[in-house]
């Protein structure tokens, strides 16, 4: 497989990993805020998401630092996209307390 195809696939895999990580974070925060045991949601989510991403980076890189870097770039790109998609709209009126 050509190197450009490998880098593209690693970038896409990083975006999928990032979407799962940050989407899972958003989901866990929503569930945790409504739960009577939020610490379980946050800790369980952290362990699951981190383990998933570390395993994904390990398998995608295959020992090649360039693929690992491409995967990391995809992960960061997914973070930017997820952050924009889940941002709360800002109010147009800003009230100042006296």
Image (cartoon, rainbow, N blue to C red):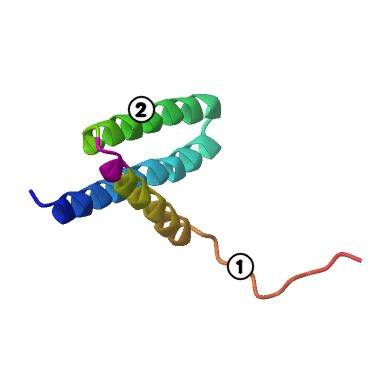
Dividing the picture into quarters, in which one does residue 27 lie? Answer: top left
Residue located farthest toward the right when viewing the structure as drawn: 98
Residue topped by disc 1? 90
Q: Position of residue 29 (x, y in %)?
A: 50, 40
The magenta segment: 64-68
Q: Which mark is residue 51?
A: 2
* In this view, 63 is above or below 2: above
Task: Answer whether labels 2 and 1 touch (C-beta < 8 Å).
Answer: no
Question: Which quadrant is home to the C terminus?
Answer: bottom right
Name the element at disc 2: helix
**Mark 2 neighbour density, 10 Å: few (under 14) some (14–19) many (20 or more):** few
**Residue 61 counted in the magenta span:** no
Q: Position of residue 14 (x, y in %)?
A: 30, 46
- At 24% from the left and 46% from the top, the residue drawn is 13
Describe residue 32's horizontal placement relative to residue 57 as left or right: right
Nearer the observer: mark 2 or 1; the answer is 2
- At 55% from the left and 66% from the top, the residue drawn is 89
Main SS class of the magenta portion in the image: helix
**Mark 1 neighbour density, 10 Å: few (under 14) some (14–19) many (20 or more):** few
- At 51% from the left and 59% from the top, the residue drawn is 87
Dividing the picture into quarters, in which one does residue 49 lie? Answer: top left
- Name the one closer to the observer, 90 or 9: 9
């Amino acid at each position: 497989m050509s190197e450009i195809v490998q880098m593209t696939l690693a970038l896409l895999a990083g975006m999928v990993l990032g979407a799962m990580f940050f989407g899972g974070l958003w989901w866990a925060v929503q569930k945790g805020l409504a739960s009577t045991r939020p610490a379980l949601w946050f800790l369980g989510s952290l362990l699951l998401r981190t383990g998933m991403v570390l395993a994904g980076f390990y398998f995608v890189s295959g020992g090649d630092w360039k693929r690992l870097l491409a995967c990391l770039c995809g992960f960061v790109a997914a973070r930017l996209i997820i952050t924009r998609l889940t941002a709360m709209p800002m109010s147009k009126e800003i009230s100042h307390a006296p």
